[in-house]
Image (tube, helix red, strand yellow):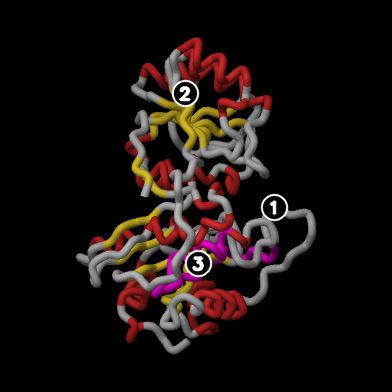
Amino acid sequence: MNVLDLPRPYLLFLADVTDLSYVKTAAGLRDWARDQCVAEWALPGNPLRLGLPVMAPAEAAGAGARALVIGAATMGGAVRPAWVPALVQAMEAGLDIISGMHGPLASVPELKEAATRLGRQLIEIRKPPASLPIATGRKRTGKRLLTVGTDCALGKKYTALALTHAFGRAGVDVSFRATGQPGILIAGGGIPMDAVVSDFLAGAAEALSPAAPADHWDIIEGQGSLLHPSYAGVSLGLLHGSQPDVLVICHEAGRKRILGLDAHYPIPPIEEVIELNLMLARRVNPGVRVGGISLNTSRLSEDEARRVIEAEARRTGLPCADPIRGGAAFDQLVEACLEPEAALAQ
């Protein structure tokens, strides 16, 4: 696994992105690495806020920030021209720039020139290690849990992190394995799966989660969805290379169609999602099982969330919980993931 030595703490840049679904990097750092976040900063006119102090680069640098993290994303992963003056301003204030975008920062002439002139770093998180192997398909020792989703941007990373913390509290030897730029920034290392050449995706997943002691758990952050017309390839490579023993199915309550596409792609019943993931996961691990369902209820009230979680658990016969809300339902999900006998028959 790539281990990164990053300049911390951070100023989180929200740019001009107003949809919370497209600021996952910034939101993830706020929620899971709050002590490393000095402030947030958006372009003029952007009303989106994450609840951190709002500071321009010079003020953030004065408060201790060492780098600006591009916390927003775009379809296609390119740095928008409107962002460039702000990024130059940050470098002039003494901050390095950290990016998880697909498009390299140094490919933008103004950014490259400013970094050279000012002696700043342009740090690319979405850069896989060199010489990744092709997958072998050989079974590895240790135990693995992979979060998979009905769609993108609905809680696979949060679920994996919450389960990692819960396993640790239970005295389990556990590691969080990051596969996307927010998770890599939180964990300090990982492999950005969506930047890996397709032939090496499963091999990268094998390298990310190598053989381990029999009682060790790797909790692997899922990416994309097998249902997503744009990103299913990444999801399948990660599924095969992870060889998971346990799957946790992640879904957002109320989401009816795939996010970010003009065409209408409905999300099928969760039972079909379970069947599809199990069928493909059994190719590399015949003993794989579903530990339960992680339900993102962030748009619901406490009472609405409780009713939806209880109804989904009754309907599917599987433990169901919102990991961020926690409680007894989440405790049951954790128990079912750890103990095969606690999981109901598939």
Residue 90 visible at all: yes
Q: Marks 2 and 3: which is nearer the front?
A: 3
Please tell me how crowded label 3 is: few (under 14), some (14-19), or many (20+) other residues with Cα within 10 Å: many
Residue 153 is situated, as x and y percent measured from the top left of the image, at 57, 54
Which of the two discs, 2 and 3, labels the residue nearer the N terminus? 2
**Residue 199 higher or lower than 86, as above or below:** below
| Mark drawn on residue 239 | 3
**Residue 111 higher or lower than 335, as above or below:** above
The magenta segment is 234-257
Label 3 is placed on what type of residue?
Leu
**How far apart are labels 2 and 3 at the CA level?**
40 Å
**Residue pointed to by mark 2:** 55
Q: Quadrant of residue 162?
A: bottom left
The answer to whether residue 231 is left or right of residue 133 is right
Element on which disc 3 rests: helix
**Residue pointed to by mark 1:** 260
Label 2 is placed on what type of residue?
Met
Residue at 50% x, 75% y is 281
